[in-house]
Amino acid sequence: MGQGKNQYQIIRTALNEQIESGALKPGSKLPSERLLSEKFGTTRITLRESLSSLEADGLVYREDRRGWFVSPERVTYDPTVNANFHTMVTRQGRLPDTRMIHADLVPATGRVQKLLQLPALTPVYRLQRLRSVDGRNVLYVENYINPAYFPDLLKHDLSRSLSDVYQEHYERQYARVSFRIYPVGLNTEASSHLKVTTGSSGLLVERTNYDQSGVLIDCDFEYWRQDAVVISADTRVT
Amino acid sequence: MGQGKNQYQIIRTALNEQIESGALKPGSKLPSERLLSEKFGTTRITLRESLSSLEADGLVYREDRRGWFVSPERVTYDPTVNANFHTMVTRQGRLPDTRMIHADLVPATGRVQKLLQLPALTPVYRLQRLRSVDGRNVLYVENYINPAYFPDLLKHDLSRSLSDVYQEHYERQYARVSFRIYPVGLNTEASSHLKVTTGSSGLLVERTNYDQSGVLIDCDFEYWRQDAVVISADTRVT
DNA sequence: GAGTGGTCTAGACCACACC
DNA sequence: GTGTGGTCTAGACCACTCC
């Protein structure tokens, strides 16, 4: 079944078995490409073909210039549940963390302007944050927030969950969400934070969020490592 | 950003501009790898690196052994809308088609048994279908259906939409859906039908469906070409 | 049958991570 | 500084598509 014929598929299968048997544990580093290619009696190019194939299936992942690792179990992410990232991850028995990279006020342009339905160049808050699970960076998020509804937002602690800040200081909460999921190659910004090679596959989740009164309050762009997540939702059919 | 330094990124950018400028039209075939590599003064390996990068972004796609093509616009797919595939695609001004590959009764095993919550080896209907948009195969679907609720299902015309058959002959309709989205490498089965190389990136949408009485009636596995779809939903936060 | 993409070899240099 | 992964060269053969 698609593993027998080509050399890179044979190697792929061999590595796969090592992983499934537990000889290679989640999070552990694989031997160097040169060592592996020698061990399998092939060239680095061919070996990398095998690894890329495993990578596409989310069984191994790369850290830029650091090597190949066995992928931990995926985190389940439900965009329709009003649980924040920390709650969601903790409930799955994993250890979440959020690191603020940058927060500022910028003019809305392009996609942001369109999604937030604002006049051109309206200032919006931009948050850039990096989120990890069990110490591994899995998600780079950019939030764009309409300041009309959240004056002085940047004065609060934004390494927490945004929804908590909304709730506590502005009495607003997410009530409706619209999201779109794109399989993409990660851009330079996301790649560098996630420590992946520019252009590696990832998942872009683009959300627009409404509060309890139906007001469009913010949008965000979530760049996920392709192997780190499974997106899950349970909804009524309309 | 991120296109200047390496040769394959420079080539990537050049091809990208050709596509965006309209010099290469959606659905059209690129020149052969040998011709392109010569034109860019590089080797096939490097050129393929550029193409793979564009492929990850969904800008070009491959057909196994047939060559590289410019990707048409993505189809928007909303798993929470009770519109069938044909309706959904037609509304977007595109031309849908469904081809039945195989229909039979098989014992439920593994994931199917688990999702449908059936005793081991309970017979279930299996439908294997291939769906296209504007003549391009974009989706390979396997449906697994609990025969208890749909006696003699195979006697009906199943090249139509399943939901229509459910509605007309069994007075059941989808009312609740639970879905999970995995970025995966496409398996042999899906790859061969979609005419892609085994292991190319794709999106697996796994659904479990309930009728208006809350009865779990079927599940399906939808293997999408990675560049052909954007998954979209609009839901209330719970 | 000609040409294509899929696969593979046997090297190489460089920038960066890690020691 | 050493070794690693990232990138690149210059070829090759095979299986398949298309004519």
Image (cartoon, coloured by chain):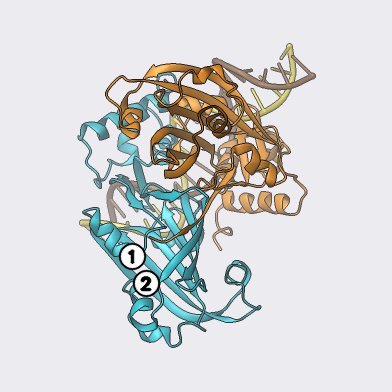
Chain colours: A cyan, B orange, C yellow, D brown
How many numbered dots are placed on residues in this image? 2
List x then y, in percent, for residue B25: 75, 44
Where residue B187 appears, as percent x and y from the top left, is: 45, 29
Nearer to the camera, A214 or A28: A214
Relative side of A196 to B12, left or right: left
Residue that appears at 32% across and 20% down: B122
Give A160 or A196, whichever is nearer the viewer. A160
- Between C11 and B213, which is closer to the camera in this rendering? B213
In the rendered image, the quadrant that contains the N terminus of chain B is bottom right
List the residue tagged with mark 2. Answer: A163
Chain ID at mark 2: A
Decide if residue B95 is on the left or right side of residue A207. right
Q: Chain of mark 1?
A: A
Q: Amino acid at mark 1?
A: Asn
The residue indicated by pointer 1 is: A84
**Does the residue at mark 2 contact the one at mark 1 (Cβ under 8 Å)?**
yes
Visible in this render: residue B33? no
Other-residue count near label 1 (Cα within 10 Å), few / some / many at <14 / 14–19 / ≥20: some
Distance from disc 2 to disc 1, alpha carbons, whole Å, reads 7 Å
Instruction: Specify the label residue A119 is tagged with.
Output: none
Q: Amino acid at mark 2?
A: Ser
Say which residue appears at 69% left-offset and 33% top-offset.
B32
Compared with B148, B30 (above or below) is below
Asked if residue A37 shows in the view, the reply is yes
Q: Quadrant of the C terminus of chain B?
A: bottom left
Whether residue A72 sits left or right of residue B137 in the image: it is left
Question: Callout 2: helix, strand or loop?
Answer: helix
Q: Residues within 10 Å of mark 2 (few under 14, many from 20)?
A: some
What percent of the width, then of the height, locates residue B49? 55, 43
